[in-house]
Image: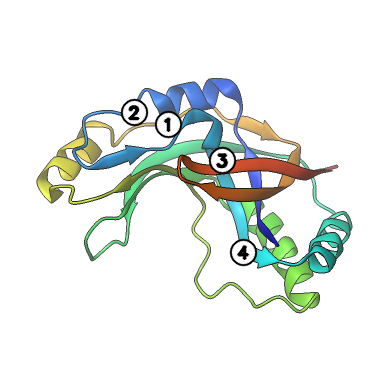
Amino acid sequence: MYRLFVAIDLPPDIVARLQELCYGVPGAKWVQPEQMHLTLRFIGEVDGGVFREIKEGLADIQSLTFSLQVKGLGFFPPRKTPRVLWAGIAPVEEVCGLRNRIENVLVGMGLTPEGRKYSPHITLARLHDTPLARLGRFLAGNGLFATEPFPVSEFHLYSSELTSKGAFHAIEASYYLR
């Protein structure tokens, strides 16, 4: 079985800027720099035949290169106990367009549609028993966080292996934008 997702990698300078934020939040399990990415679609576990079909099907996606900027911070879920601290993405039109093309290909292959609305973000930390007041101060102190725009010219199909030391991600295929 393969546990798959589709994502955009971040340039090293953007990852370094995000890493500068990774402190000062009690109960935060910070994402390692090599694990930071922008997920376009989590697929989940599939067998080898479906894996090959997905790998081939994603190659048919046509999209132009575009620029993204990491901008703003927040948490999920918005009106419940915070579980994920994230950095936002601007603008979202191009990334949502690419994500929708990916979704259409996957659903066309018979995969179950994504159940929730797509909200492009980069996970910075998983939160456990984080005091809301401390999280609020962190967000207020870093509320104007933004990076320089960066070009996006490819996306990747990743496999993810869950281990006792965390998830290990490997690129299974890369797809270049025009």
**Quadrant in the picture for residue 124:** top left
Disc 1 designates what residue? 146
Query: If you read the primary sequence from the N terminus, does the residue marked by circle 1 or circle 2 appear first?
Result: 2
Task: Tell me how far mark 3 sits from mark 1, CA to CA.
Answer: 16 Å
**For the C terminus, which image quadrant?**
top right
**Residue occupied by mark 3:** 37
Relative to 69, say whether 58 is above or below. Answer: below
Q: Nearer the viewer, mark 3 or mark 1?
A: 3
Above-or-below relation of 104 to 35: below
Q: Position of residue 3 (x, y in %)?
A: 64, 58
Q: Position of residue 125 (x, y in %)?
A: 36, 42
Spatial CA distance of label 4 from label 3 is: 17 Å
Rate crowding at label 4 as few (under 14), some (14 to 19) or many (20 or more) other CA atoms within 10 Å.
few
Residue name at image x 32 percent, y 40 percent:
29
Looking at the picture, which amino acid does disc 4 mark? Answer: Gly
Please report the residue visible at 17 percent of the width from the left and 44 percent of the height from the top.
136
Mark drawn on residue 44: 4
- Residue 11: x %, y % from top left: 61, 27
**Near-viewer residue (172 or 41):** 172
Judge depth for marks 4 and 1 and give the one in front: 4
Q: Amino acid at mark 3?
A: His
Q: CA distance from mark 4 to mark 2?
A: 29 Å
Tell me the crowding category of disc 2: few under 14, some 14 to 19, or many 20 or more residues within 10 angstroms, Cα based. Answer: some
Rendered residue at 60%/49% (across/down):
161
Q: Nearer the viewer, mark 4 or mark 3?
A: 4
Query: Dot 1: few (<14), some (14–19), or many (≥20) neighbours within 10 Å?
Result: some
Look at the numbered disc 1 and give the secondary structure of its residue.
Answer: loop
